[in-house]
Image: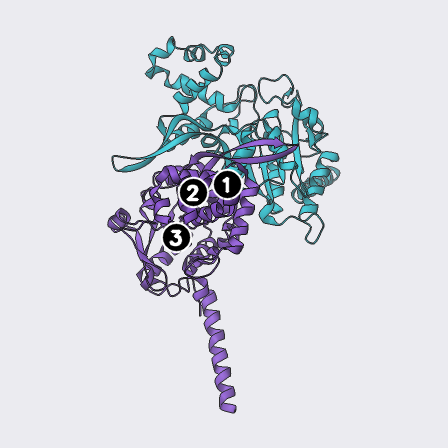
Chain colours: A purple, B cyan
Amino acid sequence: MTSLFISILVSCTLTFFHTAEADTTPLPSWNAGSTKQSIVEFVEKVTKQGGPDFVPEAQRIATFDNDGNLWAEQPLYFQLIYAIDQVKKMAPDHPEWKTQEPFASVLKGDQKEVMASGKKGLMKILAATHANMTAEEFQANVAEWLKTAKHPKFNKPYNELVYQPMLELLQYLRANGFKTFIVSGGGVDFMRVFAEQTYGIPPDQVIGSSLKAKYEVRDGKPVIVKLPEINLIDDKEGKPVGIHQYIGQRPIFASGNSDGDYQMLEWTTAGSGPRFGLLLHHTDAKREWAYDRESHVGRADKALDDASKNGWTVIDMKNDWKTVFPFDQP
Amino acid sequence: MTSLFISILVSCTLTFFHTAEADTTPLPSWNAGSTKQSIVEFVEKVTKQGGPDFVPEAQRIATFDNDGNLWAEQPLYFQLIYAIDQVKKMAPDHPEWKTQEPFASVLKGDQKEVMASGKKGLMKILAATHANMTAEEFQANVAEWLKTAKHPKFNKPYNELVYQPMLELLQYLRANGFKTFIVSGGGVDFMRVFAEQTYGIPPDQVIGSSLKAKYEVRDGKPVIVKLPEINLIDDKEGKPVGIHQYIGQRPIFASGNSDGDYQMLEWTTAGSGPRFGLLLHHTDAKREWAYDRESHVGRADKALDDASKNGWTVIDMKNDWKTVFPFDQP
């Protein structure tokens, strides 16, 4: 009895110490190694008052891609899954969709045919599920979907498929005076529904692709109406443009995972003074997915080729991360 | 001698107490009265934890128009004066402007003729002075102008013609957990050059009219190029749209001075819960300017008509403000 008691006590004490350590060491879900070390060294040098690489707080801007970088993007971009789910939900009011592409393929569950409909087809799905409604109606739809929809592989709400090490990185940067932004090809109105609660990033620090909008007073009540016209495609060359329009200064830290992030990383790291480019390589087929050059989502080809030349730090998910998702944590 | 000494001492002590009081009482440059009182009451009720009107910090969004609201706008919008000054500076490289309108009128100093050239003429001036250059070149030009140009009436740099009571209001709101934004018809790239230093508002919290931009790599160096195409006119109906696109949530406090701010005030105060609309009426012909319904800048007509009906608080500059400009301070 006594030895069991002691053993429990020791085990509890060890757990206590383990937790205490995890709370004070930065980036606890990152394995020790050159990736983690280079991040910590960068943060320490830009925050060292009086040091040669010190950067004032007002210039500590960090930008993060979202899909495949803060949360997962397989088997399809989650926003596209949302759009497909919405088409199915709206179908009873649209009997014509049974024979109209790309809706017919969506309803049949023929993903390949949906993707084959190309940009034109996707714009039709986007217009049907993201436009011609007020911003408030759209937000309510997304919030409802996040509460009810489950990821096909993990059977968890989509906003639980976020990367624990990246949540820690966001917190670590903020604790060191950085202002953290999302700069994503995903829809800005879509991401703003969950970004604050999920990442601690307020709506005005979320930059994404957007539709045009108009303001009108309907029956005495002012509303913002989402229009079926593209305002900004916040991807590739669009990312530095989005950063310019929304943030108004060049980041000193950028984090992405695909060729869509190439220009954001390039724009960030080509500036003078200390700069950090971080590229997440999906190498973990067991805990997440392994994909890069040939992927239908988050293709990383040129970004991987040029990472070393451009001085970007590459995260090897399998080896650099102790934990992938929060629900995996011991 | 002794009595003079005591008199000096008393006077110093009184000055000391006066200063000490000014530092701790909110809004020292506002005269006591219903305007100041209604602002303070609003801030106190939305920050009162557990009170019926408490608003969490994340939702304490305050938006401010700039021209005629944070800084002056007479005799012309300062950005237009900048553009005119730039045309004059660039003229030696453009001999064709001597006969081309609206440039010829700008160079002759014929302001009336410049204004008569209308939207088309102003777009030509804008394209010549705001586009087809990199964002960094434009910023450098504006910074140089702010350092050298002087306001014709006050003979001070333009960014010293800011309203002391509004600087105090911005600080007061921020001290109470508000996030303060500029939402102006003025150019966003123009305002971002001075907004942080002048108002304590960082570039990403400045929303304004903007041109489209593109990203390109020139001789191995990435640049953002300003294009001669309108991206957003952040005025009238454009203000709630700008707020939606950039801030992503509805303000609870909005401050403006003209009909161009009507929709921002309407959008803000039509929301549920506690809301505050503030309209600055230029009534001080002596210390600033007196203008409203017939003005060529900052026209306030419908906004003044509907202020009472909409529950907006109107600032009477002459009577509500102890001081107008910081350089007027005793």
Mark 1 on the same chain as mark 2: yes
Q: CA distance from mark 2 to mark 3?
A: 22 Å
Mark 1: give few (<14), some (14-19) or many (20+) Cα within 10 Å: few
Task: Examine the rendered structure and indicate whether residue B136 appears above or below residue B297.
Answer: below
Pointer 2 or 3: first along the chain:
3
Mark 2: give few (<14), some (14-19) or many (20+) Cα within 10 Å: many
Q: CA distance from mark 1 to mark 2?
A: 10 Å
Amino acid at circle 2:
Phe
Q: CA distance from mark 3 to mark 1?
A: 29 Å
Percent coordinates x, y for residue B194 in the rendering: 48, 33
Question: Is residue A157 or residue B45 the one in the foreground?
Answer: A157
Mark 3: give few (<14), some (14-19) or many (20+) Cα within 10 Å: some
Q: Circle 2 marks a residue in which chain?
A: A
Left/right placement of residue B218 relative to residue B213 reads left
Q: Which residue is mark 2?
A: A103
Q: Which residue is mark 3?
A: A73
Contact (Cβ within 8 Å) of mark 2 with mark 3:
no
Residue appearing at x 43%, y 30% in the figure: B143
Question: Is residue B279 or residue A8 the one in the foreground?
Answer: A8
Amino acid at circle 3:
Glu
Question: Is residue A176 or residue A123 the one in the foreground?
Answer: A123
Question: Is residue B117 or residue A92 the one in the foreground?
Answer: A92
Percent coordinates x, y for residue A22 in the rendering: 45, 67
Question: Within the image, what quadrant is residue B130 found in?
Answer: top left
- Residue at the far bottom: name it: A1
Percent coordinates x, y for residue A69 in the rendering: 39, 53
Residue A94, disc: 1
Contact (Cβ within 8 Å) of mark 1 with mark 2:
yes
